[in-house]
């Protein structure tokens, strides 16, 4: 069975239920949506990977560190989505810059 089709399973009452699997990260929990080609993907993966690809670069200055958006989320790194000029911007910061950027973003303007 392909990952995109999900899998049927049986719960303790012997009733079948559907298990979706994200075709981008392989995860089976969280909010899912169907892609235009009928595959199941996490809403998070679709949003972040669409803009950045599988890996993204830290958004701090000239930092060249790259990481997966899903790994950044799992590690608790600072990630923010802003709208600028009518477009959404997804920014994430590597561990070294994450706390500084989170503090800066939370400061009243």
Image (tube, rainbow, N blue to C red):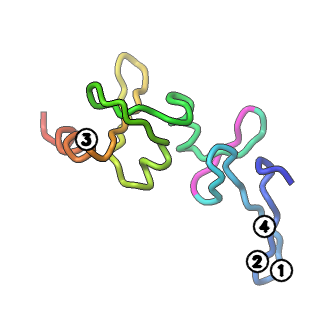
Tell me the crowding category of disc 3: few under 14, some 14 to 19, or many 20 or more residues within 10 angstroms, Cα based. Answer: some
Q: N-terminal of the two: label 3 or label 1?
A: 1
Q: Are marks 3 and 2 in contact (CB under 8 Å)?
A: no
**Distance from the alpha carbon under mark 3 to that under mark 1:** 49 Å
Which span of residues is magenta-colored? 30-36
| Element at label 3 | helix
Q: Nearer the viewer, residue 97 or 89?
A: 97
Q: Mark 1, residues whose alpha carbon is within 10 Å: few (<14), some, or many (≥20)? A: few
CB atoms at circles 3 and 1 under 8 Å apart? Answer: no
Mark 1 highlights which residue?
A: 14
Disc 1 to disc 2: CB gap under 8 Å: yes
Figure quadrant of the N terminus: bottom right
Q: Decide which of 47, 108 is in the foreground and name it.
A: 47
Of the pair 29 and 75, the residue shown nearer to us:
75
Marks 4 and 3, how far apart in space?
43 Å
Q: CA distance from mark 1 to mark 4?
A: 9 Å
Residue ID for mark 3: 97
**4 and 3 marks in contact (CB < 8 Å):** no
Label 2 vs 4, first from the N-terminus: 2
**Distance from Cα at disc 3 to Cα at disc 2:** 44 Å
Q: Are marks 2 and 4 in contact (CB under 8 Å)?
A: yes
Q: Residue at x 72, y 55 (%)?
A: 20
N-terminal of the two: label 3 or label 2? 2
Q: Which residue is mark 2?
A: 11
Instruction: Residue 53 in the image: state x and y as whole percent.
Output: 55, 31
Q: State the image coordinates of residue 11 (x, y, percent, origin top left).
A: 76, 77
Q: Nearer the viewer, mark 3 or mark 1?
A: 3
């Amino acid at each position: 069975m392909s990952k995109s089709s999900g899998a049927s399973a049986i719960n303790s009452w012997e009733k079948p239920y559907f298990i979706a699997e994200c075709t981008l990260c392989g995860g089976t929990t969280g909010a899912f949506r169907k892609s235009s080609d009928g595959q199941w993907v996490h809403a998070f993966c679709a949003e972040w990977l669409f803009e950045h690809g599988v890996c993204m670069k830290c958004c701090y200055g000239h930092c060249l560190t790259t990481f997966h958006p899903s790994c950044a989320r799992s590690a608790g790194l600072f990630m923010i989505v802003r709208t600028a000029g009518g477009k959404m911007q997804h920014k994430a910061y590597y561990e070294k810059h994450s706390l500084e950027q989170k503090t800066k973003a939370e400061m009243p303007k």
